[in-house]
Image (cartoon, rainbow, N blue to C red):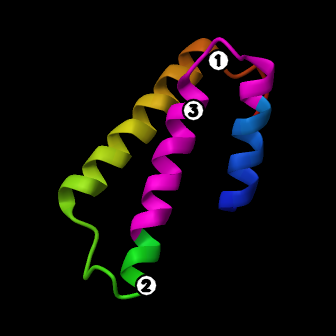
Amino acid sequence: MCGAHLIRELTAAEEDFPHQKWHQQIRWALAGLNTQATRVRTGEIGEITPEALLLHLRAFHQGITVGLSQHPRAPGRK
């Protein structure tokens, strides 16, 4: 899935589950990584610092973990 599709899916999850926060956390992490990548591409910074990368990856993985724990995959679905 491309980034735009991921954001649409996360927006749909937010509409379906407005009292949960995992989708917002994932979207924040993806947006932060995208911002850092854009800054590297434009030459504003030389690289994404390990600290920034770790911050966003931890937030992303934590959001995924929480989302999956609250919405387990239906049996038989791939």
* Residue type at the position of mark 1: Pro
Q: In this view, does 42 lie above or below 59?
A: below
* Mark linked to residue 24: 3
- Residue sitting nearer the eye, 18 or 70: 18
* Residue type at the position of mark 3: Gln
Tell us which disc is closer to us: 3 or 1: 3
Q: Position of residue 48 (x, y in %)?
A: 28, 68
Task: Identify residue for label 2.
Answer: 41
Using residue 5 as the reference point, say whether residue 35 is left or right of it.
left
- Residue sitting nearer the eye, 59 or 68: 59
Q: Give the range drawn in magenta.
A: 13-36
Pointer 1 or 2: first along the chain? 2
CA distance for labels 1 and 2 = 37 Å
Q: In which quarter of the image is residue 60?
A: top left
Q: Which quarter of the rendering shows the N terminus?
A: bottom right
Q: Which residue is drawn at 57% across and 43% down?
A: 27
Q: Is residue 54 above or below residue 58?
A: below
Using residue 72 as the reference point, say whether residue 43 is left or right of it.
left
Q: Quadrant of residue 69?
A: top right
Q: Where is residue 65 in the image (x, y as percent from the top left)?
A: 47, 26
* Mark linked to residue 72: 1
Q: Is residue 64 above or below residue 35?
A: above
Q: Which residue is drawn at 40% across and 76% down?
A: 39
Label 3, residues with CA under 10 Å away: few <14, some 14-19, many ≥20? some
Q: In which quarter of the image is residue 2?
A: bottom right
Q: Is residue 1 visible?
A: no
CA distance for labels 3 and 1 = 18 Å
